[in-house]
Image: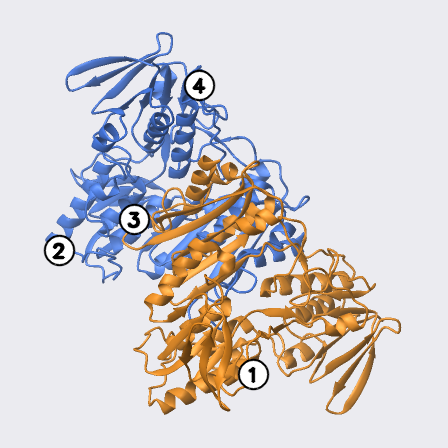
Chain colours: A orange, B blue
Amino acid sequence: MDTFVVVGGDAAGMSAASKAKRDDPSLDVVVFERGEWVSYGACGLPYYVKGEIQSLEELVSVTPEQFREERDIDLRTGHDVVDIDTDEQTVTATHADGETVQPYDRLLVATGAAAVEPPIEGLDREGVYTLGSMSDGNDLREYVARARAEGDLEQPDEGPACQYLKSCAGPVGVVGGGYIGVEMVEALAANSFEVHLFQRGERILKPFGPDIADTVLEHIRDQGVVVHLDAAVTELAGGDTVGAVVTEAERVPVDMALVGTGVRPRTALAEAAGVECGETGAIATDSYRETNVPDVYAAGDCAEATHVVTGDPAYVPLALTANRHGRAVGATVAGTPTEGGGVAGTAAVKSFDVEASRTGLFPEAAEAAGFDPISRTITTKSRAGYYPEGGKIDVTLVADRGTGRVLGGGLVSAYGEGAVHRSHALVGAVTEGVTVDELANYDLAYAPPFNTTWDPVLTAAKVLGGDR
Amino acid sequence: MDTFVVVGGDAAGMSAASKAKRDDPSLDVVVFERGEWVSYGACGLPYYVKGEIQSLEELVSVTPEQFREERDIDLRTGHDVVDIDTDEQTVTATHADGETVQPYDRLLVATGAAAVEPPIEGLDREGVYTLGSMSDGNDLREYVARARAEGDLEQPDEGPACQYLKSCAGPVGVVGGGYIGVEMVEALAANSFEVHLFQRGERILKPFGPDIADTVLEHIRDQGVVVHLDAAVTELAGGDTVGAVVTEAERVPVDMALVGTGVRPRTALAEAAGVECGETGAIATDSYRETNVPDVYAAGDCAEATHVVTGDPAYVPLALTANRHGRAVGATVAGTPTEGGGVAGTAAVKSFDVEASRTGLFPEAAEAAGFDPISRTITTKSRAGYYPEGGKIDVTLVADRGTGRVLGGGLVSAYGEGAVHRSHALVGAVTEGVTVDELANYDLAYAPPFNTTWDPVLTAAKVLGGDR
């Protein structure tokens, strides 16, 4: 009987374990997880901190007990894998009762990503938070509750707490204008904090391109968040507890600082075992997620994937890819070699009452990949002009001038106006190598409550086609 | 100087005229329109009758004056084209002042569609309405206002009139459970009418497949609409005024009946001129929308299009195709031969608080086209399970068993949960010949406020892939 061992019990790891056991119940499937939580939705943490979700358990899709009892997976939480021996085909894990050496026939490294530690002084001060794990979420929510209690604020009601009350707690600082940053300024503002967002560069949400990012920025500022651009944070100053965010230009007093400046792949364990990383710094794999070491796979936030446009390795650590590639590895080790597909760098984000999406290559990356990109952002109505609901929606579309191939794009609209779901059309176009003229001819769904006769995506393709 | 003549001033006709003139200002562009309205959004009529739109003018995207003055198009409203002479290359139009013979170099037939006259007795009784034209919309709205006044009901407020008050006017009957039918039962119920919907077959919304259609049906019934299935209407009985809808099984008293049993292409004028129709009964064209008669084009609701899956001619008279094919003809006659693309039979509909979409081939049509279809409907969450908003969404996916190619599909959800916009992914897959396994690997946008990690479309593809 073969043994499939998984290191890391989140999206990629548990997807692989579940799929392998389901497809081949004769497999021994052993998962080592350092913490106590498995298969949790880290993407939901901002909504837990905000107060829209009432318990961390709600973020768990399948509990450890369910994995053990219903799925017959030998899940060992509280087990920290400290060594992989690829010659002996064993992993060594430490735990409360000592050490376990576990043989494997196939191994999946799903060690995830860790928060980048930016070159900022004072990161170890009290009152400095990150938001990557369940315990991070717990700490942050406790901070919010404590600060609100001290400020004599009412607890937020259950359900959407979108009142965005007049700021009367804090001030607090959020360092980094990426996904975590723009989601967390909402979570904190909704809890009545005066919120400062610090972004090193001249724009937040860089992967979304300037037009979409600026629309989100304007909306965030309209909600009362103070956004500091070109503001590289050098220090989180204070005594034991953080008291100010310091940039080259200014010193902003804060009671708390959340640092969300990106993640890096956790590769040390695998590298020590001779597993090679690619140029992105993440673990390199073939299209079946097998590493340079036979029978050792890597998937999720620790591993590279292949970009659907460039065909090159890319590091885009997001939840869907982890689930998909984990599942593919599970199918493969259960006997059906399965490729998990590429990544398009697709992402979605909501902040306050705005939603945005992006996929594929924007001009800078497209040029680096050898294309001659043209790009255009159009603004149009999100529904039929005469329909009583609706608003504006912006579409950025990027194509190769010579071939007309759609390389990337994104949308931004008020929350509920479809900037995210409509991006499904762009993902298909980017993945299939569709041209702007072909996309403009797509027979997309139309009815007045949902779009103009030409959906905004079609209008963007039509306009960009005219630019060539 | 060449003359481009257009017969019919709605979506296809005005799109062609505008594009031709814009691309080649030296063209003489003449449009004959029988009525007084041009370029209007007939799709908005249900919302005008409902009371969400306050004037018919709001449905007009460009006025006749704008076409004449801003776009330099010789638009002649009130001109009824009675003859096309393809040898002499002239059209003859009658109007208040007599008759005009207009030479053309290129001609577009954009005569649209007319309501099917079903084999029902009493269609000419007072109180029997259809909903195809602006004057139809006007008549129906006047009826609603009159009936409400007689019933001593308050006028509906401006804006969404979604209170669905307790029925106290009517009863009224809607004959036909297609798009118009399901949109109009909402419009009438929102105005406090007791509404009866009569559908000849066992299901409403046949093109959406049984699972989606039944979900919509259940929702409509939950709103208090009385739906009569397998109820072929034989007579609209009464004296001068309609008083009852009669089926083989029953006789339902009504004060008014709206007949919406589909449309047929208006081809008589073109056929009399030697223009050929295809097997669908609509005007046959090549991929540039040129008919069998050189320099005579046909586009919009009077013409066929090519189905993206079967490659065969199809008759799907909907607004986007009319716009797109009209525009393509405009570009072609202005010197840039342009194909307008195929149709996927994509459609969207909202009724009360439910939205639905469909595209491509469902099993019956797929079998007729020589495929070996498999189909599955899944039900999943529309957003992350822990996210405070959201609901359920159903996805029907149809694929070819042998190749795995996605042939069609559709979605249904509560209004606002994305059943329509998410269908953009299915349209791309159907158009590009993507397999279910490829679709399941799409890197679609994900964030908790918008979907589960696997968007419902991906889950459907994953499940159907497992069925093969």
Picture quadrant where residue A99 is located: bottom right
Q: Secondary structure at mark 4?
A: loop
Looking at the image, do the residues carrying marks 4 and 1 touch, with CB atoms under 8 Å apart? Answer: no
Chain under callout 1: A
**Residue, far front:** A248
What kind of residue is marked 3?
Answer: Met
Task: Please check whether the numbered discs 2 and 1 fall on a single chain.
Answer: no
Q: Tag 4: Cα neighbours inside 10 Å, few (<14), some, or many (≥20)?
A: some
Q: Which mark is residue A135?
A: 1
Dot 1 falls on a residue whose secondary structure is helix
- Give the label, 2 or 3, closer to the camera: 3
CA–CA distance in space, label 2 to label 4: 51 Å
Which structural element holds mark 2? loop
Q: Residue at x 42, y 45 (%)?
A: B201
Placement of A109 over or under B310, stated as above or below: below
Evaluate if marks 1 and 3 touch, with contact meaning CB atoms under 8 Å apart.
Answer: no
Mark 2 or 3 closer to N-term?
Answer: 2
